[in-house]
Image: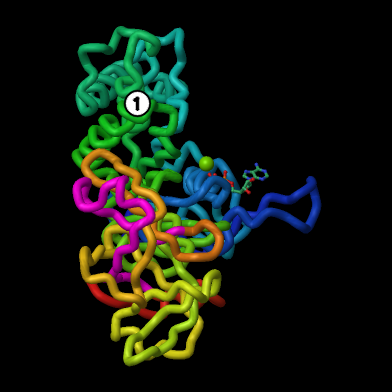
Amino acid sequence: MLEVTEYGIEIRDLVKIFPLKPGSQDGVHALDGVDLRVNPGELFVILGPSGCGKSTLLRCVAGLEEPESGEILLGRRTVYSAARGESVPAQHRQIGMVFQNFALYPHMSVAENVGFGLKTRRVALPEVRQRVAEALRLVDMQELADRRPRQLSGGQQQRVALARAIAGKPEVLLFDEPLSNLDPLLRNAVRTDLKQLIMALRITSLFVTHDQEEAMIMGDRLAVMQKGRVEQIGTPEEVYRRPQTIFVAAFTGRPVTNLIEGVVDLYRGELLLVPIESRAQTLRLPPDLAEFHGQRITVHVRPEQVRIAQGEVSNVTSLRIENVLPEGGHSFVHFHLGGPYKPLVVRTDQTSVQKEEIGRSLSVTLDGGTVYSPETGRLIGAFGG
Ligand code: ADP
Ligand code: MG
């Protein structure tokens, strides 16, 4: 039976368990019920820390790994269904993969590398030539077709790896941390380049990374994974502005973010957060959070969502400057929140707070943020913009 999905990729309740020992019942739940729907032509990013199951997910989609249960549909085809006992072999799934190490053959030319997979699949030689030329043209590498991989820059090698992946005319492209081996400067350049290439190709793509900045830049949408589960799916903006869990808030911090657990109290008409770690140092909360009076909550505020109110020092919210870390056009100012070292980090423009001000106290306002239940780690409220 042919099932039809309107999505480019649809993954339903996918479970993959690696046994701890051969034949053992216990195992690592590398994928613990993953659901994903990727639109046709979309560049969809999977973001998560090392070991959360990103590569396993790609390998299951590619047919290189057999899941325990669930379903995978690519375009109009079911390629895996546990319930129906179906699993299309990897070579028939019409998938192109790009890996971290590019995996180019050093003794082959660029053109030979791109055509190698086609030859092993016994595609007729004239067609191999035509498809190689077309793939190299798409990544703008036709001029370098006769070079060896070592005669290319990292970015050019990346393009060859992409050309090889698209030469097979895939329905879906899978990228497993393809930029991790490049040095940071090159990485930034290749990242934008690769995004433009993928968007021009209009091939449904799953792009895996552990780098939140890369995920935000590359993805039309992204899924944040932790421990084999999807924590949140959304546009980069949605995920950054409205993290659905404490984990997502922390993981998308650039470079850090503020998560403060405390009890909400009312003092002289002002709503305060009394941090668990240091009851002496309270933070003034916006009145929107009155519904949480008396409750224990975790407040999340991005460094750019805290405003320093120069001059008007109020006793309740005044915090001591612990450190000022200039970073190009802006600075991170660390305020003492009492207790063990865990400052309130505030992003300011370069000139507003100087290093000489360390030790001084300034008053701060939380302009916007999100609120979580410390027990479940789930979003329960938001304030400001
Ligand atoms: P990621 O790509 O996000 O770093 P992986 O998908 O490689 O994570 O791994 C997810 C989990 O599954 C990890 O705990 C890893 O140790 C485990 N795992 C992956 N591959 C195997 C394997 N072949 N055998 C046993 N455990 C594995
Ligand atoms: Mg991996």
Q: Specify the quadrant of the image occupied by residue 1.
A: bottom left
Horizontal side, residue 262 vs residue 269: left or right: right
Indicate whether 299 appears above or below 254: below
Quadrant location of residue 65?
A: top right
**Magenta stretch, residue numbers:** 343-370
Name which residue type carries label 1: Gln
* Left or right: residue 228 compared with residue 123: right
**Tag 1 secondary structure:** helix
Q: Is 123 covered by the magenta stretch?
A: no
- On the picture, is 150 further left or further right than 228? left
Residue lying at 45% horizontally and 8% vertically, measured from the top left: 107
- Circle 1 is placed at which residue position? 158
* Residue displayed at 78% across by 58% down: 25
Answer few, some or many: residues within 10 Å of disc 1's Cα (few below 14, many 20 plus, some between 14 and 19).
many
Camera-nearest residue between 95 and 224: 224
Q: Is residue 68 above or below residue 133?
A: below
The residue depicted at 44 percent of the width and 84 percent of the height is 264
Residue 2 appears in view: no
Please state, as top left, top right, bottom left or bottom right, where the C terminus lies in the image.
Answer: bottom left
User: Vertical placement of 11 versus 270: above or below?
Assistant: above
- Whether the residue under disc 1 has CB within 8 Å of ligand 2: no
In the rendered image, residue 353 lying in the magenta stretch gets the answer yes
Front-lying residue, 204 or 273: 273
| Residue 289 in view, yes or no | yes
Q: Position of residue 176 (x, y in %)?
A: 44, 39
